[in-house]
Image (cartoon, rainbow, N blue to C red):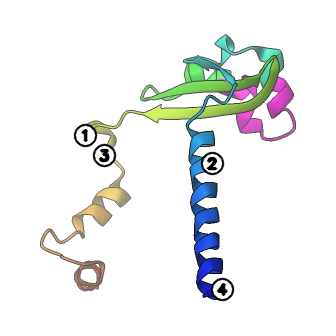
Amino acid sequence: MVKRKTEESKLQNRIASARQAWRKRHSPSGLQFVLADRIDLIPARAWDSLTNNHSWFLSREYLSVIDSAGPENVSGRYAMAFDGCKPVAALVAQLVQIDGKHLISNDPVVAKTTALIEPGAKSIAEFTAVARKKVE
């Protein structure tokens, strides 16, 4: 009987804890956000305060070059989270648009490798066996 009450108590505590965690996840964080399509629209001092000495790929200089001279099918998205006036998070995302022209290569090595693909192969093992026979 005591063991059952202990188990029920543990279960009730887990349910209460899960409910409290759910409420916390579904309530306002109090954070404010800045979203931008270009790095130069993000507050420079705030961005640098979070990203300096972490990665060159997060530097405004690098991201600015990608924005202005990067591949035509890549576009950046930038976000920052603030707790009041204090920056607490920086985020970079790249959107890549892929269509048929990005899937075709004029490289002869790629063309030769692609020609090895057996259209009817149903598994990697079967594909590998067919490809080996063609190469030999």
Give me the C-alpha separation between circle 1 and circle 4: 67 Å
- On screen, residue 106 versus residue 8, left or right, reads left
User: Residue at image x 62%, y 49%?
Assistant: 21
Residue 134 lies in the magenta stretch:
no
Dot placed on the residue nearer the N-terminal end, 3 or 2:
2
User: Residue at image x 36%, y 51%?
Assistant: 107
Q: Which amino acid lies under the numbered mark 4 shown in the image of this protein?
A: Val
Dot placed on the residue nearer the N-terminal end, 1 or 4:
4
Q: Which amino acid lies under the numbered mark 2 shown in the image of this protein?
A: Gln
Q: Which residue is mark 1?
A: 100
CB of mark 3 within 8 Å of CB of mark 2? no
**Image quadrant containing the C terminus:** bottom left
- On screen, residue 121 versus residue 112, left or right, reads left
- The nearer-to-camera label among 3 and 2 is 2
CB of mark 2 within 8 Å of CB of mark 1? no
Residue placed most toward the observer, 87 or 66? 87
Give me the C-alpha separation between circle 3 and circle 2: 48 Å
On residue 103, the disc is 3
- On screen, residue 95 versus residue 33, left or right, reads left
On residue 2, the disc is 4
Q: Which amino acid lies under the numbered mark 1 shown in the image of this protein?
A: Gly
Q: Which amino acid lies under the numbered mark 3 shown in the image of this protein?
A: Leu
- On screen, residue 50 versus residue 33, left or right, reads right
Q: Is residue 75 above or below residue 17?
A: above
Q: Residue 57: x and y, percent?
A: 71, 37
Stretch in magenta: 48-63
Q: Residue 131: x and y, percent?
A: 26, 78
CB of mark 2 within 8 Å of CB of mark 4? no
Magenta residues, dominant SS class: helix
Residue placed most toward the observer, 40 or 121? 40
On residue 20, the disc is 2
